[in-house]
């Protein structure tokens, strides 16, 4: 079982909730809908990245630097 979030972490989540609700003019249904949409977007991005990694596509930044010293 997981432990409860630390007080500072809890207040961070409370602030994030308040900010999300405020961005949706206090409409809780709109807030939930926006969060679900954001989560679906992130899940799609993650799936794309996982597919790219499993197919061998690796960005130049991810590859170790080649050394000329031998």
Image (spheres, helix red, strand yellow):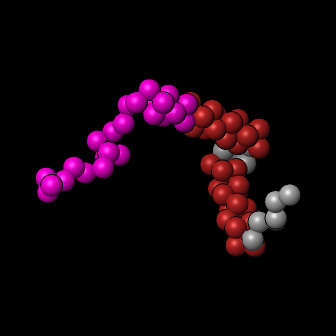
Please tell me in which quadrant of the rendered image residue 27 appears: top right
Q: For the stretch drawn in magenta, what is the main secondary structure?
A: loop
Q: Which residues are magenta?
A: 45-70
Residue 34 appears in the picture as rendered: no
Q: Give left or right: position of 3 versus 47.
A: right
- Residue nearest the observer in this picture, 15 or 48: 48
Above or below residue 45? Residue 27 is below
Residue shown at 64%/38% (left/top)?
39
Q: For this rendering, which residue is in front, 70 or 19?
A: 70
Instruction: Specify whether residue 69 is in view.
Output: yes
The picture quadrant where one finds residue 53 is top left
Residue closest to the eye, 46 or 29: 46
Q: Is residue 61 magenta?
A: yes
Q: Is residue 6 left or right of residue 62?
A: right
In this view, the residue farthest toward the bottom is: 7
In magenta stretch: residue 21: no
Residue 7 x, y percent position in the rendering: 75, 73
């Amino acid at each position: 079982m997981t432990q409860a979030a630390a007080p500072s972490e809890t207040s961070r989540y409370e602030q994030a909730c308040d900010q999300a609700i405020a961005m949706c003019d206090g409409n809780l249904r709109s807030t939930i809908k926006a969060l679900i949409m954001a989560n679906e977007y992130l899940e799609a991005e993650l799936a794309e990245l996982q597919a790219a990694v499993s197919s061998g596509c690796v960005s130049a930044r991810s590859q170790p630097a080649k050394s000329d010293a031998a």
